[in-house]
Image: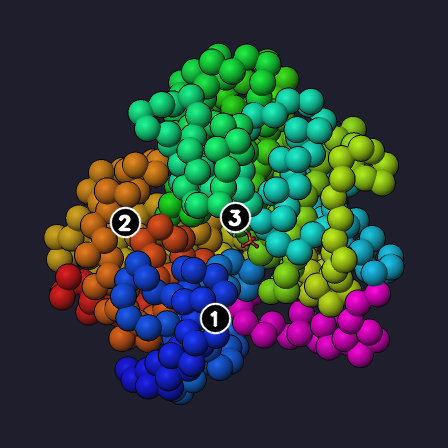
């Protein structure tokens, strides 16, 4: 495939946008080459600026669960836009989407809308700190909760007790309040809680990790976290920015039958417009301004276009009893096909899958946490990525990303993808 115009556009972008992109993973740093510029998209396909058609397995990193330019969403946005795009005043549609979200998701009474997943997680942690009167948080290595300071933390040198900044600009002062644990390792969490008695406000995690590839929680892991949080008066925050409205109507809480104290949303909830949200029971949400003392605000929060897109999306999911099964079946079919192709070429790999999230790791051993995910062979991944791209299949340009399956994918698309994997596998 030829990417002449994309290359030219990227060179232009680099002159005026740092690295040519508005979010780093788009820049292809992990795989080499130049990013592809999208012209338009419909259903399961992207059409780039050079006229190539690509089967899309990123889907805007999750939001396009029903495919690109999904008509009910597009029409809802157009209708709203004609009536004004922002007021900074309450609108009825905010209540409508809030009511629907509260009905779909277990264990939440109220929801506050923001503009991104980052903002949702950042606000959820502030709320947890304000509510509990404690400062420290536990997060898991490899889980991503957006780019707010408290989350840009890596393991401190040799210490399991507190982290250090993993980006310049994050202060030591902030880093010392974020404790880093190993995903799926409950003993590690217990040790952190014991070493910081009565200091931990919340444990935040992706209930199914999706930002170190897809990593399911081990049996009992979420339940044990729930029990620990109850015992130690710690709030459990599920970051369902990726899993929310994707794994089930009620997200991972429903799938695993575990109640979190605060739940964060993003991606699917906005139907492709910039939306995030966080939600909890009344006693916690009432702690938020203007009812309570914890401050949180946003000029464009609850924006009518964003709410219209989100509402159309959630309505669609709420009214389709089979959607989540259908997605899981398509993903399982893909899993089987990819696996067969890689096995036939004796390529070491592990495939993880939950619902419509799937990731291919070029690692022999099981992938259960950041460390085991990082053992994947990145050289093989690079060849895999570019090989698939050449076959018209677009997966995320990083081995640490999940593939997002959309309902717009037909079995013919899946077969085409599996065939492409078989072709590429021969050259790995
Ligand atoms: C994408 C993501 C975020 C950040 O959301 P943005 O909208 O990019 O700020 C947070 N948490 C998880 C689990 C995510 O996948």
Identify whether 396 is placed above or below 140.
below
Element assignment for label 2: strand
Q: What stretch is highlighted in magenta?
A: 66-87
Left or right placement of residue 182 versus residue 224 in this view: left
Instruction: State the image coordinates of residue 278 (x, y, percent, origin top left).
Output: 68, 43
Q: Which of 136 and 259 is in front in this view?
A: 136
Q: Are marks 2 and 3 in contact (CB under 8 Å)?
A: no
Residue underneath mark 2: 361
Element assignment for label 3: loop
Quadrant holding the C terminus: bottom left
Residue at 56% over, 60% down: 63
Left or right placement of residue 131 versus residue 408 in this view: right
- The crowding category of the residue bearing disc 1, from other C-alpha atoms within 10 Å (few below 14, some 14 to 19, many at least 20), is few
Residue underneath mark 3: 147
Residue at 62% over, 54% down: 116
Q: Tell me if residue 35 is in the magenta stretch.
A: no
- The crowding category of the residue bearing disc 2, from other C-alpha atoms within 10 Å (few below 14, some 14 to 19, many at least 20), is many
Tell me which numbered mark, 2 or 1, is placed earlier along the sequence: 1
- The crowding category of the residue bearing disc 3, from other C-alpha atoms within 10 Å (few below 14, some 14 to 19, many at least 20), is some
Instruction: State the image coordinates of residue 174 (x, y, percent, origin top left).
Output: 53, 34
Residue at 42% over, 33% down: 164
Q: Give the label on residue 17, or none.
A: 1
Instruction: State the image coordinates of residue 406 (x, y, percent, origin top left).
Output: 49, 63
């Amino acid at each position: 495939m030829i990417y002449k115009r994309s290359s030219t556009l990227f060179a232009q972008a680099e002159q005026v946008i740092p690295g040519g992109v508005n979010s780093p993973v788009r820049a292809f740093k992990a795989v080499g080459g130049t990013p592809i510029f999208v012209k338009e998209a419909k259903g399961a396909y992207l059409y780039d600026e050079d006229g190539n058609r690509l089967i899309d397995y990123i889907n805007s990193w999750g939001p396009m669960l029903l495919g690109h330019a999904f008509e009910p969403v597009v029409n809802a946005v157009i209708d709203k836009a004609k009536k004004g795009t922002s007021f900074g005043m309450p609108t009825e549609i905010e209540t409508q989407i809030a009511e629907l979200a509260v009905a779909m998701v277990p264990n939440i009474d109220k929801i506050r809308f923001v503009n991104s997943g980052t903002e949702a997680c950042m606000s959820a942690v502030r709320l947890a700190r304000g509510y509990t009167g404690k400062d420290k948080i536990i997060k898991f290595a490899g889980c991503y909760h957006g780019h707010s300071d408290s989350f840009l933390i890596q393991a401190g040198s040799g210490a399991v007790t507190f982290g250090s900044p993993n980006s310049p600009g994050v202060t030591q002062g902030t880093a010392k309040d974020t404790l880093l644990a190993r995903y799926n390792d409950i003993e590690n969490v217990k040790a952190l809680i014991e070493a910081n008695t009565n200091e931990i406000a919340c444990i935040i995690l992706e209930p199914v990790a999706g930002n170190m590839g897809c990593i399911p929680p081990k049996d009992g892991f979420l339940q044990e976290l729930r029990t620990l949080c109850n015992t130690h008066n710690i709030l459990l925050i599920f970051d369902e920015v990726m899993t929310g409205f994707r794994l089930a109507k009620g997200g991972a809480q429903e799938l695993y039958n575990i109640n979190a104290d605060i739940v964060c949303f993003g991606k699917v909830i906005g139907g492709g417009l910039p939306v995030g949200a966080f939600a909890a029971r009344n006693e916690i949400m009432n702690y938020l301004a203007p009812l309570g003392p914890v401050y949180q605000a946003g000029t464009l929060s609850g924006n009518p276009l964003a709410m219209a897109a989100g509402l159309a999306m959630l309505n669609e999911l709420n009214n389709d009893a089979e959607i989540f099964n259908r997605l899981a079946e398509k993903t399982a079919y893909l899993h089987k096909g990819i696996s067969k192709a890689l096995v036939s070429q004796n390529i070491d790999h592990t495939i993880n899958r939950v619902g419509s999230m799937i990731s291919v790791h070029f690692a022999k051993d099981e992938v259960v946490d950041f460390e085991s995910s990082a053992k994947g062979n990145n050289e093989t991944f690079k060849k895999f990525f570019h090989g698939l791209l050449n076959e018209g299949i677009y997966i995320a340009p990083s081995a640490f990303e999940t593939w997002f399956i959309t309902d717009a994918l037909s079995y013919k698309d899946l077969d085409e993808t599996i065939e492409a994997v078989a072709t590429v596998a021969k050259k790995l």
